[in-house]
Image (tube, rainbow, N blue to C red):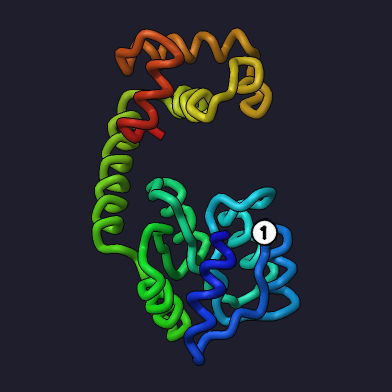
């Protein structure tokens, strides 16, 4: 329904031509490869390869199609990653068709389209995360930082030990030190703190 609605909106504009409609990330990459469109409007939550993986694949293949990410709502980490990977625009699904067309035209002209309100929130998020990362870097040893990052991504002690080339028991010791230094009571509180206070 979303694809059909967008197609209908874009068909009303003579300067825009839809060359492909795709239902998943794999199809989107294939369509860009074959059609070489100027602009790709990609939902960030595509089945299979999501919009961020599509962006990464296009960059890896040297395909220069400009990408606009379409989102239900804004998650700062995802959108900052999208910009890092080369997205040129972000538009929310709730926005009008007129804004979608304006966004596509701006991105096609080599400009970017990001909502000012979102950019402000993203900058706050970056500054908050940067301050948090500096705070922890002063408190923890380099090894404790590595353990914190592994745990914050959801890895258990055993999973964390392999890439760090240390024993599972050593991970537990480092983790206890991290809890003590950061003043948290356990793994759950540590993960929440890492996300909310920008420790990683």
Within-10-Å neighbours for mark 1: few <14, some 14–19, many 20+: few
- Using the image, determine if residue 123 lies above or below residue 185: below
Which residue is labeled 1 in the image? 23
Q: Residue furthest bottom?
A: 14
Q: Residue at position x 60%, y 77% from top?
A: 64
Quarter of the N terminus within the rendering: bottom right
Q: Residue at position x 58%, y 85% from top?
A: 17
Q: Residue 4's spot in the image, x, y percent?
A: 58, 67
SS of the residue at dot 1? loop
Image-quadrant location for residue 27: bottom right
Image-quadrant location for residue 161: top right
- Using the image, determine if residue 99 lies above or below residue 24: below
Q: Residue 143's spot in the image, x, y percent?
A: 49, 25
- Relative placement, left or right, of 165 versus 114 is right
Quarter of the C terminus within the rendering: top left
Q: Residue at position x 75%, y 77% from top?
A: 34
Number of numbered discs visible in the structure rendering: 1
Q: Residue 126's spot in the image, x, y percent?
A: 31, 47
Q: Nearer the viewer, residue 73 or 164?
A: 73
């Amino acid at each position: 329904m979303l694809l059909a609605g967008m197609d209908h909106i874009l068909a009303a504009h003579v300067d825009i031509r839809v060359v492909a409609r795709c239902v998943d990330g794999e199809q989107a990459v294939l369509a860009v490869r074959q059609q070489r469109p100027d602009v790709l409007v990609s939902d960030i939550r595509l089945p299979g390869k999501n919009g961020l993986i599509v962006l990464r694949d296009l960059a890896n293949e040297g395909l220069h199609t400009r990408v606009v990410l379409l989102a239900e709502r804004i998650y700062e980490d995802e959108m900052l990653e999208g910009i890092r990977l080369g997205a040129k625009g972000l538009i929310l699904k709730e926005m009008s068709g007129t804004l979608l067309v304006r966004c596509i035209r701006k991105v096609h002209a080599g400009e970017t389209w990001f909502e000012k309100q979102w950019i402000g929130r993203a900058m706050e998020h970056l500054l908050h995360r940067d301050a948090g990362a500096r705070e922890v870097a002063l408190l923890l040893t380099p090894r404790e930082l590595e353990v914190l990052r592994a745990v914050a991504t959801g890895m258990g002690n055993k999973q964390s030990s392999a890439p760090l080339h240390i024993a599972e028991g050593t991970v537990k010791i480092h983790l206890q030190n991290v809890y003590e230094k950061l003043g948290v009571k356990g793994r759950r509180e540590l993960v929440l703190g890492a996300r909310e206070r920008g420790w990683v």
